Amino acid sequence: MKETDRKILNKIMDADQKIIFVQTCKGAVVDSSLGKDTADTVETRLDSFKEEFEKLIRPYASLKDAPIVQVETNAASQYFKNNDTAAWTESGFEELVYVIKTVAKQLQKEYTIRNLRKVVDEVNALITLVLSVGKEEAEKKTSIEEQVKKLDKYKKYHDKIKHTKEQVVTIWNQKMDYNNLYTLYERELSRMFASRYDFNYLRDTEFTMKTNEIGEKMYEIKAHMLDNLDNARSKFKEYFDDIGLDVRRTDIQNTTVKSFFLPNMKKRRVSDAVGGVGTSAKSLLSKGSESAAEYIDKAQFIKDLKSSMELFFIPLIEHLQWWDKTIATSFIEPLSKKINSIEDDITNIDKVSDFDEVQYKKLMDISKALHNRVREVTDLCNMEHIEQTFPLYAKKSYAREKSIAFTNLFLQMCNRFYESMFHNYYFKKLSILSKNSKKTIVLVDQNFGNHFSFLNKLLRPDNEDAQRLRTLEVPYVINPQNPINDIDSFVVKGEFADTLTFYVVGNNEKSLSFMKSGSIFDEADAIQVMIEDLHRVGSALVDLVERNQFFDYIKRHREKLLLTYPGGAYFQKSRLHIMVIEAIGEINKIFDDSEIHWFIYEGFEVRYNYFYEISKGIMPDDLEPEDCLKIWKTLYLPLDEPFTEDTLLEQFAELA
């Protein structure tokens, strides 16, 4: 197992997906001799390869029960080409099919139980709602009183926070008025010397002590302000904890504002100053040697002090402004909205109309009826855990059809519902393309698995017909209306035998020759092209345009075109908008903006089509996401995964 494999495994486990490990090249394993007395058989070596891989995945706890299947694709190909059952048995694909069926049933059970549990929970919630209506009138007064108490408490805290915030901001704006502070300090420093004694170095010590006192005062202002802001916010957080509200997350402001630095003490020579003053000033100096002394240029220091204070206080003032906005956003605004919400609740409670005893009895009858409907499946929905292990493969058990553990009619109806959506939408598209009661479809695909899977879902063949379908090679005809020469033809028993004819062709010379020999494209009601890699837009375009030999026929009859993508699950949840914007949008461009019809499905899931149809109305009809969701609901489309309300709103918003 390589590093790339580990990364893929991590992604699969993060997405909570089931996984089956398939070891290939089983046919390359041969008997080996390790000495005179030691020899490994093929079975022994295969087992050892499986054991080695089990050791590699053992650290992944969620993979401990994942099945490991060993296959040989060449042997399987012999079965598909020559119906060689012995090759099929040796290929290991019988076990792979069995394991996939087992996992599929496992997933189906989990999915069905989860959805059934959701329905039961909703019904139980409705029952609870119905039962609570009887008590509503008696509890209305109590509820209003409780809401009023809560409202008073919220308002008290709201006023406290607002008043404290305004008070803190006002006080610190006053304390950090650096113009007033500078005027005060300038006056104090100027008083310490007369202008004619500015050069007196004997006064420098006193002056320096005063400037240090100013520096300490600046640090004190900063420390006190930051502590005051933090304490106030902590107090507001206590208020929110008391009323059970969470503080809205905000950006973190950097509080490491610049430190205060006193201006440099610039020195001047006394002799320079004395040279420009009168005799009385010179007499203050005793001997000439003292005239060489230096003194602090106090006037220059006072002038520089203003710039230092500006550099220090402006970031502090900005931090105070940020704190002011943060408190309003994190505390005051949410609390105001909560207060308005409670006031609306009180008003709405008062508006609740009274009801009489007859109405109450009817509500109780509804509750009892609902309870009886869900009682049969409640035990099933209370299952906390569905067995995750996979049964060991046994060739004898493969031929036996295992009965589904849950045979509840309700579950069968759920499955039938999605199957019905699949068929209804497909026939809706065919009816748009053609009004003929009997329809002929040219199905173009180079992948056997795609067209077989589609026909198997649509025509519902029995086991015998499905086995026959597997042996057909393109080109072939399903349910021909007239005898066909040169290619295989086959009638699938069922409700569509007389209404749907499929010409299944592949991207090969034999199919192209067959199509050129007749006017099938001209007479067809629909040209259905299977797109294999819709999520790889560039690759899909290349396949469709450059490598598809039928492209000229397809473009000539684009009004009949039905593009089909059988892998819709790739675009689940956060990628639904990409399906419309990038994938489908890019492929539609090559048909000159014609109206191209799509049929997208995954299993029997066809709601991707409705998402695409509704999204097309966003631009011309100026639809909002809420309007799109409303259309979805009016079509009575299910709102379970991946098409939940939140997902749909988010993805319609992305498209808008």
Image: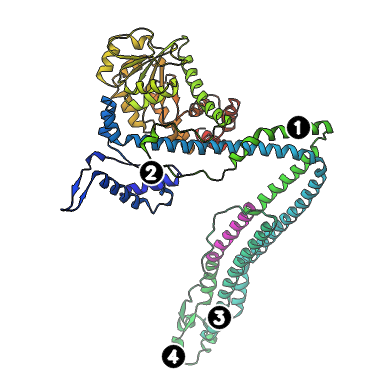
Reading the chain from its start, which is encountered first: label 3 or label 1?
3
Q: Residue at the location (34% across, 11% down)?
A: 520
Q: Callout 3: helix, strand or loop?
A: helix
- In reply to whether residue 538 is colored magenta, the answer given is no
Looking at the rendered structure, the kind of residue marked 3 is: Phe
**Residue range corresponding to the magenta coloring:** 309-329
- SS type, badge 4: helix
Looking at the picture, which amino acid does disc 4 mark? Ser
Q: Quadrant of residue 104?
A: top left
Distance (Cα) linking label 4 and label 3: 24 Å
Query: From what the image shows, is residue 564 above or below residue 317?
Result: above
Cβ atoms at labels 3 and 1 below 8 Å apart: no
Residue type beneath disc 2: Pro
The residue wearing badge 2 is 67
**Residue type at tag 1:** Asp
Q: Position of residue 170 (x, y in %)?
A: 67, 61
Disc 2 crowd rating (10 Å Cα; few below 14, some 14-19, many 20+) is many
165 and 406: which is toward the camera: 406
Which is more N-terminal, label 3 or label 2? 2
**Residue 99 point in image, percent of width and height:** 39, 38
Q: Disc 4 or 1, which lies upstream in sequence?
A: 4
Magenta segment includes 312: yes
Per the image, label 2 sits on a secondary structure element best described as loop
Q: Which is the main secondary structure of the residues drawn in magenta?
A: helix
Up/down of 472 relative to 257, above or below: above
Q: Which residue is mark 1?
A: 365
Question: Which numbered mark, 4 or 1, is in the foreground of this view?
Answer: 1
Residue neighbourhood size for the residue with mark 4, other residues' Cα within 10 Å, grouped as few (<14), some (14–19), many (≥20): few
Q: Which residue is mark 4?
A: 289
Q: Which mark is residue 207?
A: 3
